[in-house]
Image (spheres, rainbow, N blue to C red):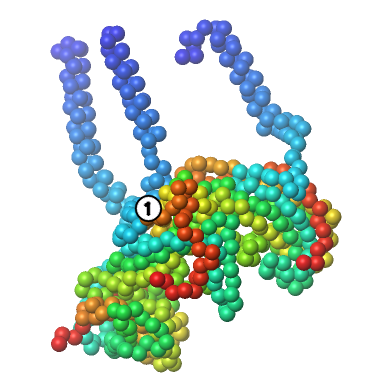
């Protein structure tokens, strides 16, 4: 073999190995790009899950559920014709939702952050508690926020009542939901009794 | 050889031009995260992401009359008061609408007035789905910024990539010089919203 | 590339580099700071001042211990009031006027930020709208014991407009600097 031929076969081998590595790199991109995206979005996705009520957990009517370190029971969902001095628009109906909670872990300020009680109907609409003063003040009931900062001890039972104003057409399908900071993205959805 | 060199230079020049074009045409951060407009006219139901808005009427006045804590007060202005009556609804969940700007024909932005603190029917509005509510936005604007104005309404003042209702105020009755035909002397803010 | 140039060009570049380096070094060491400072313009009451964001005409200044324009001046304080007529020359409603005037009196940090009152209502911290002239009072809370000189050289400050800022690419007004001095007599008023 002449020196030139040796060089040319050596060059051909190097060429082959280069091509092989180039191909491997391109295939590796197929794995690396999604992996980078996943790594970069891991933190924002974690924050998103910690901030929103995304996945419901259904609760059978009448049952007690452990949530946010305490036992929750939906006592009643009522409406009333008497709204005191507040005049509501034509097709608006007030709804009161009552819970009774037996405190398990008393660190409420950490477990119950961002307590969010809503009414959700079958069409996907949801209502937050109203700011209208239709809830008459009472020593027995407090709203979820006041309950979080009430400093209640383990074993105590708190009564929580929230008032909502919803349109009449939503009444047949609304169900109360409960979201707590420590349990997000899961939230409780209290099913209505089937009658 | 010469042909090769020229071709190389040409490709280099083209690549430089493309890179430069991409650099100068890149949208700025403010445009990438700016408001997403939802347009409409007066009387149209404009559907933004969290709320729905319809401008019912726009009235003008020289002086506003309010009564706060039992005392009557009048509010004067160097321009004209524009009172926009709207109907608001929430699309899916309870939401707050707090920010409105009157954008004049030349792009000057007049934010909703803060001088009427204690009056009802003014922003921030809490709207519930299925329960539309009527409210008023009040602006003080110079008479030259009325013809061809747009109303910009959004949930909050600082927001990114959220929808903003942009309603062209095309149904105003104006004189040939662009000022409104009807300017009330005094507008009573305590009258219920019609 | 350097090696292929003709020797004359090379010589010029070498000389030039030395000169540029000398000037830079001198600049860094403060030679240009020793030049005489340009004159600071002086404004008088009734004169229209263009600061970029604002077109201001100062009207009068006075010190009072009475309640003025509903400004929240506490007991044991007196008010230094500067009344102006000003127009917003920017494209949006703004409240960026707190550093427009500075009195420069040695009275402590608390008296540095004025209460800005719209004299129409009166109301505090009004949002001033584009192209609308309003009469505004800047009220500084001075301690009772502060002596009020007959004349105060208020410093008038301005900001420069950047159509695209470095962080978000939005227009804004940055880099506050002194535009001039407003020398205005300060009277003792009783309200």
Q: Is residue A57 left or right of residue B59?
A: left
Nearest the eye: C126 or A123:
C126
Determine the image quadrant of residue A146. Answer: bottom left
The C terminus of chain B, quarter of image: bottom left
Q: In the rendered image of this protein, does residue A53 appear above or below residue C81?
A: below
Q: Which residue is mark 1?
A: B170
Give the residue at x 44% y 53%: B174
In this rendering, the count of numbered labels is 1
Give the residue at x 66% y 49%: C56
Q: Is residue B162 left or right of residue C72?
A: left
Q: Is residue A48 left or right of residue B63?
A: left
The N terminus of chain B, quarter of image: top left
Instruction: Residue B85: give x, y in percent of width and height.
Output: 41, 65
Determine the image quadrant of residue A72. Answer: bottom left
Instruction: Residue B139: give x, y in percent of width and height.
Output: 49, 60
Nearest the eye: A85 or B147:
B147
* Pointer 1 chain: B
Secondary structure type for disc 1: loop
Q: What is the crowding at mark 1: few (fewer than 14 residues within 10 Å), some, or many (at least 20)?
A: some
Q: Is residue B58 left or right of residue B92?
A: right
Instruction: Residue B35: give x, y in percent of width and height.
Output: 38, 52
Instruction: Residue C175: give x, y in percent of width and height.
Output: 60, 44
Nearest the eye: A135 or C119:
C119
Determine the image quadrant of residue A172. Answer: bottom left
Give the residue at x 42% y 71%: B193
Give the residue at x 40% y 55%: B172
Is residue C118 visible in the rendered image? The answer is yes
């Amino acid at each position: 073999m002449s020196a030139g031929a040796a060089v040319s076969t050596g060059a051909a081998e190097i060429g082959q190995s280069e091509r092989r590595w180039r191909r491997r790199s391109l295939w590796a991109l197929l794995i690396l790009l999604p992996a980078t995206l996943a790594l970069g979005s891991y933190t924002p996705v974690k924050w998103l899950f910690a901030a929103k009520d995304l996945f419901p957990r259904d609760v059978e009517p009448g049952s007690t559920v452990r949530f946010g370190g305490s036992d929750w029971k939906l006592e009643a969902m009522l409406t009333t014709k008497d709204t005191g001095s507040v005049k509501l628009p034509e097709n608006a109906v007030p709804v009161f939702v009552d819970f009774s909670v037996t405190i398990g872990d008393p660190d409420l300020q950490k477990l119950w952050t961002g307590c969010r009680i809503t009414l959700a109907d079958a069409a996907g609409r949801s209502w937050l508690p109203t700011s209208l003063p239709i809830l008459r003040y009472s020593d027995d009931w407090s709203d979820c926020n006041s309950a979080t900062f009430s400093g209640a001890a383990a074993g105590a039972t708190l009564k929580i009542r929230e008032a909502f104003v919803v349109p009449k057409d939503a009444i047949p399908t609304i169900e109360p939901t409960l979201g707590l900071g420590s349990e997000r993205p899961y939230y409780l959805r209290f099913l209505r009794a089937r009658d | 050889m010469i042909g090769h060199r020229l071709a190389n230079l040409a490709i280099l020049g083209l690549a430089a031009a493309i890179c430069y074009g991409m650099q100068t045409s890149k949208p700025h951060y403010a445009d990438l995260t700016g408001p997403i407009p939802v347009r409409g006219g007066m009387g149209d139901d404009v559907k933004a992401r969290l709320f729905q808005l319809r401008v019912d009427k726009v009235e003008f006045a020289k002086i506003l009359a309010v009564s706060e804590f039992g005392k009557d007060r009048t509010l004067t202005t160097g321009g004209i008061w524009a009172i926009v009556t709207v109907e608001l609804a929430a699309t899916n969940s309870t939401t707050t609408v707090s920010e409105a700007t009157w954008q004049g024909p030349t792009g000057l932005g007049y934010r909703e007035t803060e001088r009427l603190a204690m009056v009802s029917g003014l922003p921030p509005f809490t709207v519930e789905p299925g329960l539309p509510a009527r409210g008023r936005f009040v602006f003080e604007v110079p008479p030259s910024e009325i013809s061809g104005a747009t109303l910009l309404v959004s949930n909050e003042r600082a927001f990114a990539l959220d929808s903003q209702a942009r309603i062209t105020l095309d149904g105003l009755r104006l004189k040939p010089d662009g000022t409104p035909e009807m300017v009330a002397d005094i507008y009573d803010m305590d009258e219920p919203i019609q | 590339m350097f090696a292929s140039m003709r020797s004359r060009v090379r010589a010029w570049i070498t000389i030039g580099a030395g000169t540029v380096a000398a000037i830079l070094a001198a600049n860094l060491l403060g030679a240009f700071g020793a030049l005489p400072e340009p004159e600071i313009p002086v404004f008088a009451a009734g004169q229209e001042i263009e600061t970029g964001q604002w077109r201001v005409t100062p009207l009068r200044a006075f010190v009072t211990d009475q309640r003025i324009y509903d400004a929240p001046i506490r007991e044991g304080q007196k008010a230094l009031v500067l009344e102006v007529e000003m127009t917003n020359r920017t494209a949006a409603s703004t409240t960026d006027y707190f550093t427009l005037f500075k009195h420069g009196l040695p009275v402590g940090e608390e008296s540095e930020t004025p209460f800005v009152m719209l004299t129409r209502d009166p109301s505090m911290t009004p949002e001033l709208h584009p192209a609308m002239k309003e009469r505004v009072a800047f009220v500084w809370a001075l301690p009772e014991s502060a002596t009020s000189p007959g004349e105060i050289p208020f410093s008038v400050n301005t900001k420069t407009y950047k159509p695209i800022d470095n962080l978000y690419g939005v227009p804004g007004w940055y880099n506050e600097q002194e535009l001039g001095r407003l020398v205005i007599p300060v009277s003792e008023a009783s309200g």
